[in-house]
Image (cartoon, rainbow, N blue to C red):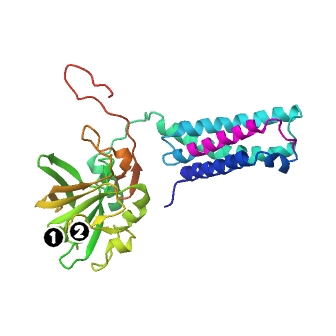
Amino acid sequence: MKKNWMSVTLLLAGIYNIIWGTWVVLLPHQVFNLTGTSLPKYPEFWQCIGMIVAVYGLGYILAAKSPLKHWPITLVGFLGKIFGPIGFVQAISNDVFPLSFGWNIIFNDLIWWIPFGLILMKAYHYHLPKKKKLRTVLQDEFSNFPDRKRAAFINSLTGLKSVHLVGTQDDEGNTNLSIVSSVFHLGASPALIGFIVRPDSARRDTLNNIRSNKHFTLNHIHEEILENSHQTSARYPQEQSEFNACELSVQTLNDFPAPFVEESRLKYSLELVREEKLEENGTHLIIAKVTGVYLPEGAISDSGAIDYEMINPIAACGLDAYYEAFKLGRLSYAKPEKRPYWL
């Protein structure tokens, strides 16, 4: 999958640090021999530096998953890459190191200044409170937006939503997969889920299969399958399975008569309860009963809530914007007589 440049930078920095640190630990004299520097009296200290650099590398790799969230790791590394060259200049002035030893400073520190600095700037602006002049957009204005602009504007009003792949199968056994961001909770007893399907003025394989088969699956999407999942929104021929076209794997669980996505980390089976056509715009509300849930071992907390940091699902806004969410924490149950507190 194509990563953003911040993730790529941190991933490359992490790999480089681990390789360089391991090299120094295993062959502590080689750096000095290659740069024509006299060997240290206590190579164990140099090996300790190698271990520290390798540990930094592991931190960069972990931070690469969410650079804006894990900016403190980048900040610590950036400070090290500033202080390292300062120490090297001082060492040169005291005739401790020759200038040739500076190759380490170039590749270990200097080349990372700009990308690390840009990551920290992005993180700063990302976490900076946004206080801007209020922009008013009344119905008369957005109704006159061009069609696509109006659709994008209204679709994004509700903010971040969970995004799923709907797995269905027709009467002939042909599988179908489509991406939706309109799934919502209806109730826990009985366990009901709802989602919206567009008007059936055009061919709607997902809707037709649910009507015919009465069963379907919902499969959460994570970053590793995001591009493949987004591609399921393309209009493939009815006889062509999006599983095959988008390189996702069909999975059968407990003989359920609809396909799951094997790569999904959280998926559940549903049975159709009722379909309601909304007269206001011709869309269809699907109400379904949850019959089975499949998720990683240990993903259910003692309270019963699902640990979504283990699942790491993607959120969507509008038709084509995707976000990675992270947990802020849990607040206590709200009561009139006292303020909530963080659990």
Residue at position x 29%, y 47% in the image: 158
Nearest the viewer among 129 and 224 is 224
| Local secondary structure at mark 2 | strand
Task: Report helix, strand or loop for mark 1.
Answer: helix
- Image location of residue 186, percent across then percent down: 16, 48
Task: Residue 180 in the image: state x and y as whole percent.
Answer: 28, 59
Q: Is residue 12 left or right of residue 250?
A: right
Residue 204 showing in the rendered view: no
Is 226 on the left or on the right of 82, as rendered? left
Which is more toward the observer, 93 or 135?
93
Residue 26: percent from the left, percent from the top? 71, 48
Whole-percent x, y for residue 280 in the image = 14, 57
Disc on res. 18:
none
Q: Which residue is mark 1?
A: 213
Q: Is residue 152 magenta?
A: no
What residue is at 15 percent from the left and 46 percent from the top? 188
Q: Amino acid at mark 2?
A: Thr
Pointer 1 and pointer 2: residues touching (CB < 8 Å)? yes
Above or below 91: residue 57: below
Residue pictured at 24% horizontal, 20% vertical: 338
Q: What kind of secondary structure does the magenta stretch mostly adopt?
A: helix
Q: Earlier in the sequence, mark 1 or mark 2?
A: 2
Q: Nearer the viewer, residue 153 or 189?
A: 189
Magenta residues? 37-59
- Read off the residue under disc 2: 168
Q: Quadrant of residue 150?
A: bottom left
Residue 56 located within the stretch drawn in magenta: yes
Q: As displayed, is residue 337 above or below residue 80? A: above
Q: Quadrant of residue 171?
A: bottom left
Q: Quadrant of the C terminus?
A: top left
Disc 1 residue type (three-letter): Asn
Report how many numbered discs are placed on residues in the image: 2
